[in-house]
């Protein structure tokens, strides 16, 4: 059975160059970068190169890059910073109802500590209205956190507009840019953000390593306590092989954005049109908004999304019903409910997330499998 992978928003395969560099660094550069002897300084040079590469990906200065274990830690660090502020005064946070669970659960934890949080709903097209974000601000608001590209729909959010409104009131801005890296150009100055989170494994890097961008001048209260690594912003000995792999992946992502977009738009168009030809009643979520090129969120009326995903898995085709972090719950997608979908509609949604290595033949095979699975599942539905 030929296996087809259409779940790149969950994770991506590390590139051959990343695998080679991680192996090389693990074998040759075993020193602790905090050590002053030759082994430590050799490791520190690897760290410096990766930091420069990561900064180039997002248009920041190298010393604004903090290496973490991934975007979940990066996001948690930002909200730990807010929690520290809350110990001194009353604070308020604004976010959206369609954020990743690492943001939503961080906000829930803040609420348990007495912090007020406002969750702004998305429009029917999956887009957050910047004016609604602005309307939610209060004199106590210290942070607004809205993701750049949604993991379920791929819809790109108006972060730059949100930042303008926030900064006019002295409010810090955070964006989870995990699904945007390597898929659209990133520039922290254009976005106007104070914090930005990334995970390497979303752009063909290794798992377990990520980035938190912290704008110069912000005295970050660290989540991790211990030594003074990462200029006292993230304690713990750095994962040098993983960080080296992140640097290689960041450089490749920065150089390959246009090719990625062109290729994925072609493949998504083939898949989308093919599905609509087979099942004209299929709903496309986020179609009228700007989306990252690789993501297609579709609802199949009368079909359970989990059942459809499992049917395709039997045929060797990997798709998703949403964020991998919520896999196994089989509850309506909070993203689609946040867009105003009914519970039944939200349960019918599956996500196809493509990569440039996918082929037209794989799209044809996926369409054929859908052509078999969807009618079968609809015929089995209890009337």
Image: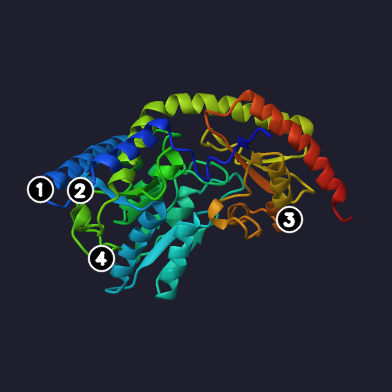
Residue 241 horizontal/vertical position (percent): 31, 44
Q: Which mark is residue 74?
A: none
Tell whether label 4 touches label 1 (CB within 8 Å).
no
Residue 112 horizontal/vertical position (percent): 44, 75
Mark 4 and mark 3 lie on one chain; the one further toward the N terminus is 4
The kind of secondary structure element at disc 2 is: loop
Dot in front, 2 or 4: 2
The kind of secondary structure element at disc 3 is: helix
- Whole-Å distance between the Cαs marked 4 and 3? 45 Å
Crowding around mark 4 (Cα neighbors within 10 Å: few <14, some 14 to 19, many 20+) is: few
Q: Which mark is residue 31?
A: 2
- Whole-Å distance between the Cαs marked 2 and 1? 9 Å
Q: Residue at x 48, y 61 (%)?
A: 104
Q: Nearer the viewer, residue 96 or 304?
A: 304
The residue labelled by disc 4 is: 225
Q: Nearer the viewer, residue 295 or 379?
A: 379
């Amino acid at each position: 059975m030929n296996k087809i992978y259409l779940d790149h928003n969950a994770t991506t395969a590390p590139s051959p160059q990343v695998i080679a560099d991680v192996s090389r660094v693990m074998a040759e550069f075993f020193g602790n970068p905090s050590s002053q002897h030759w082994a430590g300084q050799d490791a520190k040079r690897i760290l410096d190169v990766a930091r420069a590469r990561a900064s180039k990906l997002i248009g920041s200065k190298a010393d604004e890059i903090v290496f973490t274990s991934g975007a979940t830690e990066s996001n948690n660090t930002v909200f730990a910073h807010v929690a520290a502020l809350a110990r001194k005064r009353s604070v308020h946070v604004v976010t959206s109802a369609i954020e990743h669970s690492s943001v939503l659960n961080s906000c829930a934890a803040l609420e348990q500590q007495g912090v007020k949080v406002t969750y702004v709903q998305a429009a029917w097209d999956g887009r957050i209205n910047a004016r609604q974000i602005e309307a939610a601000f209060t004199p106590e608001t210290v942070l607004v956190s809205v993701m750049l590209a949604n993991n379920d729909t791929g819809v790109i959010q108006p972060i730059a507009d949100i930042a303008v409104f926030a900064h006019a009131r002295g409010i810090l801005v955070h964006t989870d840019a995990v699904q945007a890296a390597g898929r659209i150009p990133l520039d922290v100055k254009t976005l106007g953000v104070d914090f930005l989170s990334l995970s390497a494994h979303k752009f063909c890097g290794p798992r377990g390593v990520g980035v938190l961008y912290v704008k110069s001048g912000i005295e970050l209260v660290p989540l991790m306590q211990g030594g003074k690594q990462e200029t006292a912003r993230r304690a713990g000995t750095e994962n040098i092989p993983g960080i080296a792999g992140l640097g290689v992946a960041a450089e490749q992502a920065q150089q390959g954005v246009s090719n990625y977009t062109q290729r994925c738009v072609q493949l998504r168009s083939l898949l989308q049109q093919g599905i609509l030809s087979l099942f004209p009643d299929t709903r496309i979520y986020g179609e009228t908004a700007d989306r990252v090129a690789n993501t297609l969120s579709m609802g199949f009326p009368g079909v359970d999304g989990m059942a459809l995903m499992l049917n395709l898995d039997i045929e060797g085709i990997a798709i998703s019903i949403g964020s991998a972090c919520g896999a196994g719950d089989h509850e309506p997608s909070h993203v689609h409910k946040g867009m105003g979908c009914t519970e039944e509609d939200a349960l019918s949604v599956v996500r196809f997330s493509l990569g440039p290595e996918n082929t037209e033949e794989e799209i044809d095979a996926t369409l054929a499998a859908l052509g078999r699975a969807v009618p079968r599942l609809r015929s089995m539905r209890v009337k």
